[in-house]
Image (spheres, coloured by chain):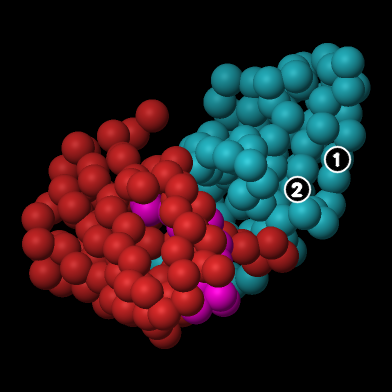
Amino acid sequence: GESVGLHLPTLSVQEGDNSIINCAYSNSASDYFIWYKQESGKGPQFIIDIRSNMDKRQGQRVTVLLNKTVKHLSLQIAATQPGDSAVYFCAENRGTYKYIFGTGTRLKVLA
Amino acid sequence: DAGITQSPRHKVTETGTPVTLRCHQTENHRYMYWYRQDPGHGLRLIHYSYGVKDTDKGEVSDGYSVSRSKTEDFLLTLESATSSQTSVYFCAISDPDGQGGTEAFFGQGTRLTVV
């Protein structure tokens, strides 16, 4: 079942290519950022995070870049696979409990 | 997956009836949250809890109440359901470690339809 917005921006990528998903955050006071993946009918799943004292962080096939000057966050997925098809959204965290979530980008992987 | 269970997973209810959604965690995380997710919106915080019997309002708390009598359980109640409360509801947990923010882990969601 559909659990996220029906009119999200969509990124279509050929299988095997790299994907770059962007996110603008709202508050320069945010000090911690997270990328989530949400598949249809499921809850958001943690992918990778980064703190504001870093510019880049790498995980398995994923890299997050943080540009604090322009308040921009990006998620790079290397060698995109069909299983990567989902909605991706960023979250910014201020303090202990306050998370602000973006509306997301739908990634479609073309065979 | 983090040990978070939401129940029920799906519910259809009539306008004006009370509804309670349950979130159960096995991670012993201090913070628990209820969010709703609607088309065109990001996840919006309804209520959160920072300990047993310690709760506070989020940005869209009107029409909702919560209770946390045990670390592992966080209940969301719609006192008198309205059609505007038709949504997908997610429970989340986190455990800040004093070093700054930490990731929130989410349950699988409850799809609530108010008719």
Region rendered in magenta: B82-92
Image coordinates for residue A93, horizontal then vertical, percent: 46, 61
Residue B19 makes an appearance in the image? yes
> Who's red, chain-wise?
B
Position above or below: B43 against B18: above
Quarter of the image with the N terminus of chain A is: top right
Quarter of the image with the C terminus of chain A is: top right
In-front residue for pair B29/A31: B29
Disc 1 marks which amino acid? Leu
Q: Is residue A43 left or right of residue A77?
A: left
Residue at x 38% of width, y 62% of height: B34
Q: Are marks 2 and 1 in contact (CB under 8 Å)?
A: yes
Residue A29 makes an appearance in the image? no
> Who's cyan, chain-wise?
A
Image coordinates for residue B91, horizontal then vertical, percent: 37, 53
Establish whether labels 2 and 1 are both on one chain: yes
Residue receiving disc 1: A11
Q: Is residue B91 left or right of residue A70?
A: left
The image quarter in which residue A91 lies:
bottom right
Residue receiving disc 2: A105
Residue at x 51% of width, y 72% of height: B85
Disc 2 marks which amino acid? Thr
Q: Earlier in the sequence, mark 2 or mark 1?
A: 1
Q: How many marks?
A: 2
Judging from the image, mark 2 belongs to the subunit labelled A
Judging from the image, mark 1 belongs to the subunit labelled A
